[in-house]
Amino acid sequence: MALVTTTEMFKKAYTGGYAVGAFNINNMEIIQAITEAAAADRSPLILQVSAGARKYAKPAYLMALAHAACEDAGIDFALHLDHGADFDICKACIDNGFTSVMIDGSRFDFDENVQVTRKVVEYAHAHGVVVEAELGKLAGIEDAVNVSAEDAMFTDPAEAQTFVEKTGIDSLAIAIGTSHGAYKFKPGQKPQLRFDILAEVARRLPGFPIVLHGASSVIPELVEEINRDGGKMPDAIGIPESMLREAAKGAVCKINIDSDIRLAMTAGIRRTFVEHPDYFDPRQYLTVARDEVRKMVHHKIVNVLGSDNKA
């Protein structure tokens, strides 16, 4: 088995009316849980690495774990850089063997975003790697990405069309109402995806893969469980899974999931220590954590992404 690009994945997802899950990884247990769930469900898969994950786990370990997961789970998957801040980090990941990179120039104005993105595209395509970029700004916090609700900005469909034409990217992350992290909406504010923007982008860019970042649903039951076991998670509401499934039936071919992984893992560990306060062997509580992540990924594949039996 091998690390592959997302090109064929996205073609099949677009025509098949489903999305491929892009799950953030940070350690061995998370990688095992995600790849085992995808293998059992026969689902296409993207493992993605943030700047924080590269710093925490170190690139050499992550690459070794990714290759080990290919062999152990017996599946192909894409290895993707999430929110690459500049050309240098994208180049480093391409040179290290990533099959997909994201250059996030959303903090720049339109012209500079085009310039930075085009440079990455030229290098990546010369090395057989695909590129994702972002247009618009999502609210919330994820590692080094921090955008206030006031600074959030929906993607303009006309700009999206021009951006794709000028950069030559392979997929585009757009802002239509999702948010990074366990984002807390204002009192009385209901999460809502701008399907009108998504539809207009799809009309202008027929067949082009669209990406949703910040698409964890922040499952309330997990937050409640963490707090019940002594945690201090704030009330948090993510995008309803029904809305994400609807988006996956259209132009959205990749949906990013990170916060729900962290919540599932933390809830499992906290519950284990409450039930077994004498545990001190990491294998005891990390086994439970891995199982919780595996169950959550299976749920996303079947009920949100619709990607089961599509590999």
Image: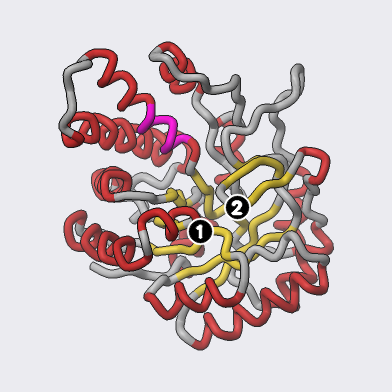
Q: N-terminal of the two: label 2 or label 1? A: 1
Q: Which residue is mark 2?
A: 144
Q: Residue furthest bottom?
A: 126
Asked where in the image residue 272 lies, by quadrant, the reply is: top left
Whether residue 93 is in magenta: the answer is no
Q: Residues within 10 Å of mark 1 (few under 14, many from 20)?
A: some
- The span from disc 2 to disc 1 (Cα, nearest Å) is 8 Å
Q: From the top left corner, tell me how far across and down residue 213 is, in percent.
A: 60, 49
- Residue range in magenta is 260-266
Asked if residue 2 shows in the view, the reply is: yes
Disc 1 marks which amino acid? Ala
Q: Which residue is mark 1?
A: 51
Rendered-image quadrant of the N terminus: bottom left
Rendered-image quadrant of the C terminus: bottom left
Q: From the top left corner, tell me how far across and down residue 118 is, in percent.
A: 67, 79
Q: From the top left corner, tell me how far across and down residue 65 is, in percent.
A: 26, 60
Q: Using the image, tell me which numbered label, if any, was put on residue 140.
A: none
Dominant secondary-structure state across the stretch colored magenta: helix
Total numbered circles: 2
Disc 2 marks which amino acid? Ala
